[in-house]
Image (tube, rainbow, N blue to C red):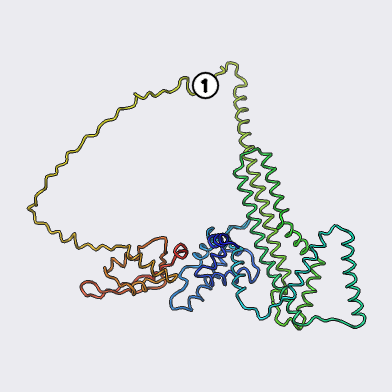
Amino acid sequence: MEFDDLEALHRNSAAWRLLRADNAPMILSFLASVFLDTNTGAVAAPEITGRLDDTLAVLNERHPVARYPRTAKEYLDEWSKPEVGWLRRYYPPGSDVVHFDATPAVVKALGWASSLVAQPFVGTESRLYIAVDLLRQMAFGAEEDAEARLGELYRRRSEIDAEIARVQSGDIAVMDPAAQRDRYQQFSTTARGLLVDFREVEANFRALDRQLRERVALWDGSKGALLDEVLGDRSSIADSDEGRSFHAFYDFLLSERRQREFAELLAAVQALPAIAETDPRMRRVHYDWLDAAARTQATVRQLSEQLRRFLDDQVWLENRRVMDILRSIETHALRLRGRSDVDIVTAIDGVVPAIALPMERPLYRLRAKAALDSTPTGTGGADVDVSALFEQVYVDPAPLREHVVRALARRSQVMLGDLLAERPVERGLAELVAYLSLHGPEFEIVFDEAYQEHVEWVDEGGVRRLATLPRVTFLRSAELAAR
């Protein structure tokens, strides 16, 4: 990849943004446990909020100071923002409860993080066989010469006949345990990858449908051309490479004979002694495929229904306008049907043009000048005590804000007590209040009412002061982190 491609991904990729996040371990582990480990689709907001609350409580107990001070709802709202793009928040049909679902960006980030873990066994033989077999399928699948096709079939039949002869003679070649583990590892990787691909396919279908809706909403041509455009693009979704590949895979899954064959083969493989540590998810991976494919199929069906209703609404609005005009004409005709003395009249807005001559405008008028007396004034004789004017305490928030930004440049969050330990209070309570009123795009202030924080300082008179306030945390914003 070129530098510009990587630079664009660094700025715009949600998966890359997730890997750069300060809380990436917590986010990835939580979303993986909710959505990916169990192959779960959308989860209702109350359920995922409760599970995140429990996770945050467990993680915060490991540290003397809460590492994750926000609430679960605040985290979920942040992750589901369009500019963040780690969760999709929506209302399923027939439900008034908001649901969350992981986006493909989460799957990609987690897949990259998982690839960093060292594998105890890395097989290469099976991948070479798969590569050669794929090349053979493509080369002879596109071959139109009948002689070439027959030659390949005769070769394969000769190999099968030779193998049958070896087995009949008692020469049975058994695959060694290393080759068995190699192929099982390749199978489990491909099986898990299929579950990941379903989310990507579903997201691509949504993107195609969104583009189509935008064109329909901005369409200013005829209705016939619109229908041609919509129907053509609608079929292009199903006829796209992803659409045809998905439907072929879905047809394979729906075959009862192939499901039974797959289950028997999977049970036989997992019973092999060489496959000692089988992945428990692989035992029912074909059912997980069915669930994921059914969700994708339901998404396509739902998008089709929504698009049809959208088009029906457009047609209904146009027909309603025409019917209103016709009904108005009929009403006027019925009202005048029995009258013969109706004068046919017409009216126009005006019979002469409105003319505004330049000289009708008011002329410019000079403003009266105020006289200014520059004579120095003398000192008054009254004895006024002005000391109260100099007793006011003013705290400049700029140095305080700069102190917070410098502290957040080294870490993702900082407590108010830590800031005051580095830079003690000099202007008393007014300076403390100034800290609480700071704001800016570089950070966010979180007040945690569940905990209290004590702040001490010594005023100008040498008196020790103590203030008790809710625990205050300054969180580094994404804008500051990106600098």
Picture residue at 88% right of the left edge, 82% below the top: 171
Give the x, y percent position of residue 326.
63, 30
Q: Of 321 and 172, which appears nearest the observer?
A: 172
Q: Is residue 95 left or right of residue 257?
A: left
Q: Residue furthest left?
A: 381
Q: Quadrant of residue 33?
A: bottom right
Give the x, y percent position of residue 168.
92, 80
Label 1 amino acid? Ala
Q: Residue furthest top?
A: 341
Q: Is residue 457 left or right of residue 378?
A: right
Question: Disc 1 marks which residue?
Answer: 347
Give the x, y percent position of residue 275.
74, 81
Q: In the picture, which quadrant includes the N terminus?
A: bottom right
Is residue 329 placed above or below 283 in the rendered structure?
above
Mark 1 crowd level (few <14, some 14–19, many ≥20, 10 Å Cα)? few
Give the x, y percent position of residue 235.
72, 50
Picture residue at 77% right of the left edge, 66% below the top: 134
Q: Is residue 335 left or right of residue 166?
A: left
Q: In the picture, which quadrant includes the C terminus?
A: bottom left
Q: Is residue 13 visible?
A: no
Q: Is residue 148 left or right of residue 184?
A: right
Picture residue at 87% right of the left edge, 62% below the top: 149
Q: Residue furthest front?
A: 2
Is residue 374 placed above or below 72 in the rendered structure?
above
Q: Is residue 1 visible?
A: yes
Picture residue at 72% right of the left edge, 68% below the top: 287
Q: How many numbered tags mark residues here? A: 1
SS category of the residue bearing label 1 = loop
